[in-house]
Amino acid sequence: MRQRGRLLHAPAPAWLVALAFAALLAARPASGAWCIARSGASEKTLQAALDYACGPAGGADCAPIQSSGLCYLPNTLAAHASYAFNSVFQRSRAAPGACDFAGTATTTLTDPSE
């Protein structure tokens, strides 16, 4: 549609708006929070917490941070720990205390992947 040299856009159909909104919601954790490695945590304590999170007791899905995984990069202890901590945190449905990992983790409302 054109009106006096301007291109007018027809409004998006309601189903398309609803689909876009649903996709946006699906990309965010249900809690709206993420669990990440705390800056300043010692490497020794952070590694122990990562080992716990990826072990049977922690229950994190750590396959994506293995060398052939999609989330391996950046290959840093803090990035891998953050991934594992958040996996446990989201699986617990952001239960109170689920983001501590011996003081090496903290929650954030900012998406760490952005």
Image (tube, rainbow, N blue to C red):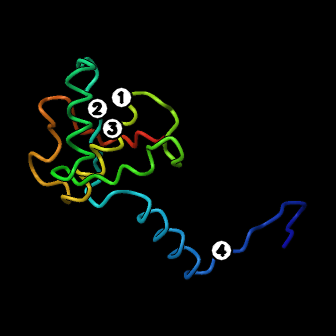
Picture quadrant where residue 102 is located: top left
Mark 1 = which residue? 78
| Crowd rating for badge 1 (residues with CA inside 10 Å; few <14, some 14–19, many 20+) | many
Amino acid at circle 3: Ser
Instruction: In the rendered view, tell whether residue 113 sits above or below residue 11.
Output: above
C-alpha gap between disc 2 and disc 4: 43 Å
Mark 3 = which residue? 82
Q: Kindly indicate whether the residue at mark 3 contacts the one at mark 2 (C-beta within 8 angstroms).
A: yes
Badge 4 element:
loop
Mark on residue 62? none
Amino acid at circle 1: Ala
Quadrant of image for the N terminus:
bottom right
Mark 4 = which residue? 11
Q: Kindly indicate whether the residue at mark 1 contacts the one at mark 2 (C-beta within 8 angstroms).
A: yes
As rendered, which of 8 and 108 lies closer to the eye? 108
Amino acid at circle 4: Pro
Q: Is residue 30 left or right of residue 114?
A: left
Badge 1 element:
helix
* Residue at the spot 83% in from the left edge and 63% down from the top edge: 7
Q: Is residue 89 left or right of residue 114?
A: left
Image coordinates for residue 5, horizontal then vertical, percent: 90, 60
Mark 2 = which residue? 37
Badge 3 element:
helix
